[in-house]
Image: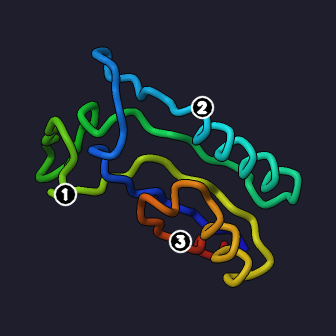
Amino acid sequence: MRFMLIHYINEALLRFDEDGNEIEDPDEERALDAWDDEMKARGILVGGGRLRPVAETITIQARGGGVLKTDGPFAETKEQIAGYCVLECANVDEAVEVSSRHPTASIGTFELRPYKAD
């Protein structure tokens, strides 16, 4: 089964430089790399990526033949989407287990959603 693991994190917990680049913590990066390496070796992590800060978001809506473009996220929440993983797991139990071991699970919220069957 294929799942999308969507990472929600409160950006107030992160640090950024004046150019909007995240200042990475070496220990956190090692933990993330270790999780990624293990899941790739197991054939579970098949895609994913980290996103730029929410301040660079553009929300787009196509309505009535026109396009409405708004700077920033549409939702007014403390947690915003920070990244995602595409997981290939035997079942939902395995997907929950590997997701709960992701290093940022302790500071954010994850949404685990199965892909629609073809």
Badge 1 density bin: few <14, some 14–19, many ≥20, Cα 10 Å: few
Which residue does the image show at 60% across and 31% down from the upper left?
A: 26
Is the Cβ of the residue at disc 2 closer than 8 Å to that at disc 1?
A: no
Where is 97 relative to 19, above or below?
Answer: below
Badge 2 density bin: few <14, some 14–19, many ≥20, Cα 10 Å: few
Please name whichever residue, 93 or 63, is drawn nearer the observer in this view of the structure.
Answer: 93
* Amino acid type assigned to the residue bearing label 3 in the image: Leu
The mark nearer the N terminus, 2 or 3, is: 2
Please name whichever residue, 64 or 117, is drawn nearer the observer in this view of the structure.
Answer: 117
Which residue does the image show at 22% across and 56% down from the upper left?
A: 78
Seen in the image, is 87 located left or right of residue 44? left
The mark nearer the N terminus, 1 or 3, is: 1
Badge 3 density bin: few <14, some 14–19, many ≥20, Cα 10 Å: some
Is the Cβ of the residue at disc 2 closer than 8 Å to that at disc 3?
A: no
* Amino acid type assigned to the residue bearing label 2 in the image: Pro
Quadrant housing residue 75: bottom left
Seen in the image, is 8 located left or right of residue 73? right
Which residue does the image show at 85% across and 58% down from the upper left?
A: 43
Give how far across and how far down residue 22 sits, in percent.
41, 28
Q: CA distance from mark 2 to mark 1?
A: 31 Å
The residue singled out by tag 3 in the image is 112
Number of numbered discs overlaid on the protein picture: 3
Nearest to the eye among marks 2 and 1: give it: 2
The mark nearer the N terminus, 2 or 1, is: 2
The colour scheme of the drawn protein is rainbow
| Farthest-out residue, front | 27
Quadrant housing residue 79: bottom left
Q: CA distance from mark 1 to mark 3?
A: 19 Å
* Amino acid type assigned to the residue bearing label 1 in the image: Ala
The residue singled out by tag 2 in the image is 26
Which residue does the image show at 57% across and 42% down from the upper left?
A: 49
The residue singled out by tag 1 in the image is 75
